[in-house]
Every structure is written in structure tokens, then in C-alpha cells.
Amino acid sequence: MELTFLGTSCMMPTKERNPSAMYLEYKGEGLLFDCAEGTQRQMRIAGLNLAKVNKILVSHWHGDHILGLPGLLLTIASLELSHAVDIYGPRGSKKAFQQLFGGIEFETKFNIHITEVHEGTFYENEDYRLESMPMKHPVPCVGYAFVEKDRRRINVEHVKKLGIPEGPLLGQLQRGETITWKGKKVTPEETTKIVNGKKVVFITDTMPNQNCGMLAANADLLIIDSTYTSKLQDKAEEHGHLTALQAAQIASQASVKKLILTHFSARYKNTLELEEDARTAFDNVFSAYDFMRVNL
């Protein structure tokens, strides 16, 4: 699993930072969180394959989070891929999408599915699930969690001693099933170990609220809105954002392992002040920058 930050600025781009976008690649599948203007160009610079994008998770429909959608989707449509693109967003997303794309024509047939999400699990397969919780912002807004499922890993040395060959029997053990080998029962407990899945949470454009902590609970990685330092808390409240200190307090209360700050106001020439603000409440904190990659 690899994360690439494509945009870490707030409303306005700067020379160093594009507005909000983050790409997660998992087992060859691409999930894009928000899609600000210039996102597809950022992806090309980062060497990411646009053809892998099959899920786009929109936090809310403010322009600095979605104005890259038209260009990106037009480019993906031109690739004539076999898979559809699923777009998820808060309540009102279908209407917002229609208003944004109403006058845009696609040259080829293109399957786009739009799903409005609110609270709880909205997608699940054998490897992971996606969850959302509503946030507190002037427009409908949600945060997202990518939750990898726990999986069993074969104890190679033990199964070699037992003489179990590669093939369907090992697959059964990995699925947690007991098998019979040479007349004896072999259990998954003795031949496999549980590998805990990773949890990555993306929260942006919100004021403090209890859903932040609920969504982020025990996350391996929390990526969160940190638009201002606590010196500008009044401005953060005025515009519906978090300070770096508030972001760190959420991480601490939610027992998060690692915190990455993002969505910075253009007033900050560097992020040292924001990191220092956050570290008064949480130690394991870093500031995101465009094209930063994180492997989990």
C-alpha cells in the first residue's frame, strides 16, 4: 500500500503546493481522495498511472477539492478502459456532479457511478472496506477511512515440515479452514499467523466534532486538515477548519499511531510552526508536501 500526496495546500495553490488531492494504490487499484485543479498533471509528474484510478472519494464539493474532476475524467474516458469509475461523496453529490458536468460531452461511452455516502461502511470486498462519517463544515462534508482486513499468512517452515505442498490446501488454511493431510487434521491456528490490516483515515475541511475521533480510532495513519496554527483559531472557526493543535488532539484522543498534517493555508511559507503547534499534543507528527510518498 502506497500513498502519494498530490496536493497539500488549502484553497489557493502556491509555487510548491497544489490544492487538495491524495492517491492511494493498493494491490494495483487506485483510490483518489479529492481532486483539486491540476490533479491529473500532478499524477503524471509523480509517475502514477491514470488508468488505475477506479474510485474517487470526494470529501465535499467546494471548488478547491473537485475542480480537477472534469479534466481527469475526460482523460480517463479517452483511455477506453473496461472498468467503471466509482465516485463517492456526501449527500447532494449526484446533483453537484450533474451541475458540474452538465455541459461537458464525453467523446466515448464512459461508465461513471456516483454514490452518496453518510455514515458507516459503504464499500467492502475481500481485502478492505471503506467507511465514512459526516464532518462539520459549511457544506455537506465527509471523512473517509480505508480499512484493510486482517489476513492469515502461512508459516512456511511449519507446513514444509508437515510436507503440505503448495496449492489448494494452503489456500484453505489461509482462509481459516481446517484441512486433512495424511489422515490427520491440520488447523489454521497451527500453520498460519494473523497479520493485522492497516487503517488509513483522511479528514479534511472540518471543525472539531466527535465523528473525527470515531472515524480515526486506532488508525495506523491519520491525514487531517491543519489549515492554521492555534494562534489563528478564530479564523479556523470562521472558515470551518481545524488548527494543527486541534488535529493533534484528535490524533491523541483516537489513539492514532502516526499523524500527517495537510491542507495548509498559503500564508505559511514552511510548516515548522504548524508542526510545533501539533507536537504540544502529539509526538509522531509530520507535515505533508506535494509528491511525498508513504508506504504502509
Image (cartoon, helix red, strand yellow):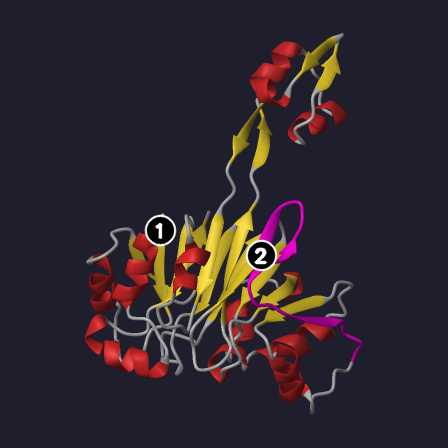
Which of marks 1 and 2 precedes in the sequence? 2
Q: Quadrant of residue 112?
A: bottom right
Identify the residue shown where x is 75% and y is 66%. Answer: 81
- Whole-angstrom CA distance, mark 2 to mark 1, is 19 Å
Residue 174 x %, y %: 65, 29
Give the residue number, with chain letter if any, for mark 1: 258
- Say if 13 sits above or below 133 in the image: below
Q: Position of residue 54 (x, y in %)?
A: 66, 63
**Looking at this view, is 136 or 281 the one in front?**
136
User: Which span of residues is magenta-colored?
Assistant: 108-130
Q: Residue at x 28, y 70 (%)?
A: 243
Helix, strand or loop at disc 1? loop
Residue highlighted by disc 2: 130
Q: Quadrant of residue 245?
A: bottom left
* Image spot of residue 129 (x, y percent): 60, 52
Q: Residues within 10 Å of mark 1 (few under 14, many from 20)?
A: some
- Labels 2 & 1 near each other (Cβ < 8 A): no
Q: Nearer the viewer, residue 78 or 84?
A: 84
